[in-house]
């Protein structure tokens, strides 16, 4: 119990500060992906990011994870170390052709504790096996990830996040291409992390699912159309604004000096 309490205390210290965006602009080859965005992800909040394709949702998650440079403005993580942020990328963007086992993939969640070049301790391999059992993948430890279905692979990626044990969880389309049973299991994990006091931010496309499970929503169309309580954000008017904004996009936009967008 002492070790568990110590980890929880450390996590609480990590999430004491909010994640604050001030006039944040993110670009791809100097073309805006997220444009003058201001707002706050409160500590221990559960937030969905929704919006049309090309709205900058994945780019925003990658910036919070430290994988995409800030072009303008401020992204204030409140002093969070890199190991305090877990990222679940889109499963479709990952190459599963490399011959690696499910257990090896899950154990990668421990790299923040072990180091990139150290031998993986047995305790961490045991932790990885326990995480696989928790997501219903017990018995798949030695299976190559290339042999898994989309839902099974998504469960493996969630198990890796369990091993990482980060106080901030960033999830990019976590329920995409999975069956209803897997979706329910993964939603249960997200709610569990939220109840433990972690900050959970998920990019999603199913607005009914968002309305049912996420109290906070950022509706993004490169700029914030709305950010706050889900019921107040996902109005027909805001959804129309986001769609019209997407229809007006050009293929090669210039970086503009638009005023600050809606702040949460």
Image (cartoon, grey):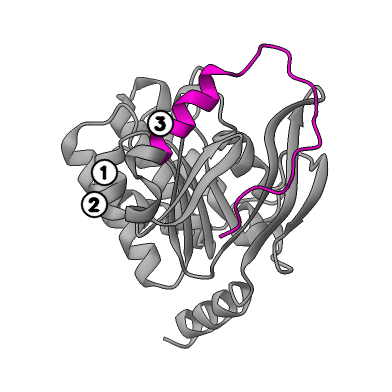
Q: Would you call the spot at circle 3 few (<14 residues within 10 Å), some (14-19), or many (20 or more)?
A: few
Q: CA distance from mark 1 to mark 2?
A: 5 Å
Q: Earlier in the sequence, mark 3 or mark 2?
A: 2
Label 3 sits on a secondary structure element that is helix
Q: Which residues are magenta?
A: 238-264
Position of residue 153 measured from the top left corner of the image (x, y, whole percent): 37, 32
- Counting labels gives 3
Q: Nearer the viewer, residue 41 or 261?
A: 261
Residue shown at 74% from the left, 19% from the top: 253
Q: Residue 77 magenta-drawn?
A: no
Q: Secondary structure at mark 2?
A: helix
Identify the image quadrant of residue 137. Answer: top left
Q: Is residue 263 magenta?
A: yes
Image point (65%, 47%), residue name: 261
Q: Main secondary structure of the magenta part?
A: loop
Where's the N terminus, which quadrant? bottom left
Q: Residue furthest bottom?
A: 2
Q: Earlier in the sequence, mark 1 or mark 3?
A: 1
| Cα gap from disc 1 to disc 3, whole angstroms | 19 Å
User: Which label number is shown at residue 240?
Assistant: 3
Q: Which circle, 1 or 3, is nearer the viewer?
A: 3
Asked if the residue under mark 3 is in contact with the one under mark 1, i.e. CB atoms within 8 Å, the reply is no
Q: Is residue 58 rendered to the left or right of residue 142?
A: right
* Secondary structure found at label 1: helix
């Amino acid at each position: 119990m002492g070790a568990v309490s110590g980890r929880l205390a450390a996590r609480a210290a990590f999430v004491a500060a909010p994640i604050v965006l001030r006039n944040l602009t993110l670009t791809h080859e100097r073309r805006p992906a997220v444009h003058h965005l201001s707002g706050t992800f409160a500590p221990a909040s559960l937030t969905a990011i929704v919006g049309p394709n090309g709205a900058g949702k994945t780019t925003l998650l990658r910036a919070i994870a430290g994988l995409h440079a800030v072009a303008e403005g401020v992204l204030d993580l409140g002093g969070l170390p890199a190991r305090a942020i877990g990222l679940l990328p889109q499963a479709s963007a990952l190459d599963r052709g490399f011959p690696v086992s499910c257990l090896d993939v899950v154990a990668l969640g421990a790299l923040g504790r072990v180091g990139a070049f150290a031998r993986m301790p047995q305790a961490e391999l045991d932790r990885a096996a326990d995480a696989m059992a928790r997501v219903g993948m017990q018995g798949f430890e030695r299976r190559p990830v290339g042999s898994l279905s989309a839902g099974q692979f998504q469960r493996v990626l969630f198990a890796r996040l369990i091993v990482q044990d980060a106080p901030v969880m960033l999830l990019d389309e976590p329920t995409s291409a999975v069956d209803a049973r897997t979706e329910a299991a993964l939603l249960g994990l997200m709610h569990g992390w939220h109840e433990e006091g972690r900050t959970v931010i998920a990019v999603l496309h199913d607005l009914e699912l968002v309305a049912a499970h996420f109290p906070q929503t950022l509706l993004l169309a490169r700029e914030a159309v709305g950010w706050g309580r889900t019921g107040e954000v996902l109005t027909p008017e805001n959804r129309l604004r986001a769609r019209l904004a997407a229809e007006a996009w050009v293929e090669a936009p210039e970086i503009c000096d638009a005023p600050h967008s809606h702040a949460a």
